Amino acid sequence: MKIALMDSGIGLLAAAAAVRRLRPDADLVLSSDPDGMPWGPRTPEDVTAHALAVARAAAAHRPDALIVACNTASVHALPALRAALEPDIPVIGTVPAIKPAALGGGPVAIWATPATTGSPYQRGLIRDFAGSVDVTEVPCPGLADAVQWADRDATRRAVAEAAALTPARVRTLVLGCTHYELVADDIRTALEHPDGPELVLLGSADAVAAQALRRAGERPAPSAPATGALTVLLSGRPSTLPAEALHYPEGRLLTAATAVG
């Protein structure tokens, strides 16, 4: 079995690590776009063009499913990706975990990029799945870039700025950008109060990993031998994981548990 993941940068690490934990024997193809990132400031048409190029590079390796591990690409390019690749390759998009967050009754905050915060897409998810829940949208300028470049000081500053905009009453936080899942511990530390209840952080990595296995017709087998290979494509070029990826446990897991393809 082979699962491909795509993103503009290293935000795909969280979902890739989730797939690896579920199926240590699965081959992984990680396709990103360092030449074209960030995608957030691009027009929807530009995002779609870059996403299609990255997806086609991954599709050339004949995966059994493709995870679009990027909220921006899922918002703007998912229909085009599915039209180009399905039914041969199932395409799984990334949706912020607003629906499960709302089931807890709130209050809820959603951390996302400035382009996503307040967007019709995110507002539609809130309306459809959290209409009666107290939801605060929090823009996080600079956080995805800081995570991408493993800049610890910039990450702490961006997290602190977003935490200052997050109401103290919030007990459930939706991570609306895949990059943010890589610094979940920093976010939790910034938001939790010593005498308050534990903060619930909801990302999308585990859900999309499980869905990719289902679409590929496979079941989780976490005790399977760690025999899966790792193929890395940077703007279509065969490579290795960027050095920044190894600053995160998810990146180290992938390199430690796989043979490089």
Image (cartoon, rainbow, N blue to C red):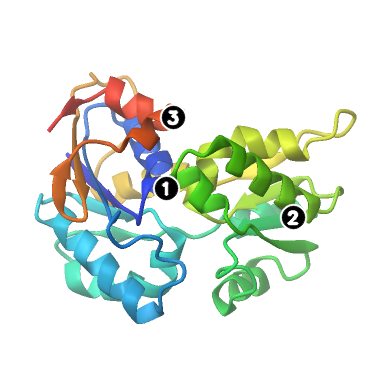
Q: Label 1 is placed on what type of residue? A: Gly
* Badge 1 element: helix
Q: Which mark is residue 11?
A: 1
Quarter where residue 46 is shown: bottom left
Q: CA distance from mark 2 to mark 3?
A: 29 Å
Is residue 106 visible in the rendered structure shown here?
no
Pointer 2 local density, CA inside 10 Å: few below 14, some 14–19, many at least 20: many
Relative image position of residue 174 (x, y in whole percent): 63, 52
For disc 3, the marked residue is: 247
Q: Label 3 is placed on what type of residue? A: His
Question: Which quarter of the image is occupied by the N terminus?
Answer: top left
For disc 2, the marked residue is: 108
- When the figure is inspected, residue 86 is found, relative to residue 187, above or below; the finding is below
Pointer 1 local density, CA inside 10 Å: few below 14, some 14–19, many at least 20: many
Q: Residue at x 28, y 22 (%)?
A: 257
Relative image position of residue 59 (x, y in whole percent): 14, 57
Q: Earlier in the sequence, mark 2 or mark 3?
A: 2
Question: Which quarter of the image is occupied by the C terminus?
Answer: top left
Closest to the camera, between mark 1 and mark 3, is 3
Left or right relative to 261: residue 146: right
* Badge 2 element: strand
Is residue 239 visible in the rendered structure shown here?
yes
